[in-house]
Amino acid sequence: MTDISLSPFELYRHADVIVKSVIIIMVFSSFMTWFIWVGKMIEVYLEKKSLKKFNEYIREAILLKDVRITGAGYCFKAISVAKHELGIAETITPGARNHESIKERAMSKLMQMELLQIRKISGMTSILATTSAVAPFIGLFGTVWGIMHSFVSIAQTQTTNLSVVAPGIAEALFATALGLLVAVPAVILYNILGRMINGYRIILNNVAATVMCLLSQQLDVMAYEPHASGGNNNGLLHPEASV
């Protein structure tokens, strides 16, 4: 009679090599799921905090040219896009600006930037979805293999004694249990992360709307002061010179 307990280590130690491989895959998948989730939660939290702070800052500004920000992140790029479009209009068609055309081009670029930012922040989250869908089936494969191994043991020993087949069945079922323990948290963590990313998308929309409001206000002022630039675009064509 084989001594075996419900200890995970003992179940693993007595398992067949295939079942052991399945158990190792499940443990690795669980570790990877939690590692990705923690990392992405921290990343999304810091990005949301930065965007909220930036949005509060630009809400206090009256004109686009009043905003001063440096860096290489989304906030800097959003302001740079608006200033660049305004600067191009001032340089190419001074005194004949099409306000709607300028705003459409700026909004189009901001939308493209938003999509790229969402894609960047969503990177590796698909691993959680894949793990939640695949883990139960990998665990089930380990169970099926373990039960088949138990039946082979019955044939080899030519006995139906429960002590012969019970250890193999217990080890096999342990693989399915691990699959569920990996898959269920992966689904929950993926949904939590998805809600946080949706909230991040809303903040990106708010930032883009605020930038467009500043651009519109700047255009309104320039419409009443057509010669205010005096042939100079006030640094709008090259935003990096003024931010």
Image (cartoon, rainbow, N blue to C red):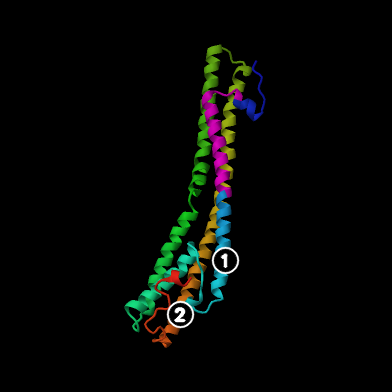
Q: Position of residue 60 (x, y in %)?
A: 56, 76
**Does any portion of residue 88 appear in the rendered image?**
yes
* First-in-chain label (1 vs 2): 1
Residue 50 lies in what quarter of the image? bottom right
User: Which residues make up the magenta segment?
Assistant: 13-38
Q: Is residue 26 above or below residue 227?
A: above
Point out the image quarter for the N terminus: top right
Task: State the residue position of label 1.
Answer: 52
Q: Residue at x 39, y 87 (%)?
A: 227
| Amino acid marked by disc 1 | Lys
Q: Residue at x 55, y 35 (%)?
A: 26
User: Majority secondary structure of the magenta segment?
Assistant: helix
Question: How many C-alpha atoms fall within 10 Å of the one at disc 2: few (<14), some, or many (≥20)?
Answer: some
State the image coordinates of residue 64 (x, y, percent, origin top left): 48, 76
User: Residue farthest to the front?
Assistant: 241
Residue at point 53% right, 24% down? 17
Q: Which residue is mark 2?
A: 218
Label 1 environment density (alpha carbons within 10 Å; few <14, some 14–19, many ≥20): some
- Between residue 235 and residue 10, name the one nearer to us: 235
Task: Determine whether 58 is above or below 123 in the image.
Answer: below
Q: Point out the residue furthest to the left here.
A: 92
Q: Residue 16's x, y, as percent? A: 54, 23
Residue 186 in view here: no
Indicate the position of residue 58 as horizontal and vertical percent values. Answer: 54, 73
Q: Nearer the viewer, residue 63 or 143?
A: 63
Q: Is residue 107 left or right of residue 37?
A: left
- Please check the rendered image and state whether residue 181 is part of the magenta-colored stretch, yes or no: no
Quadrant assignment, res 232 = bottom left
Q: Amino acid at mark 2?
A: Gln
Numbered label tally: 2
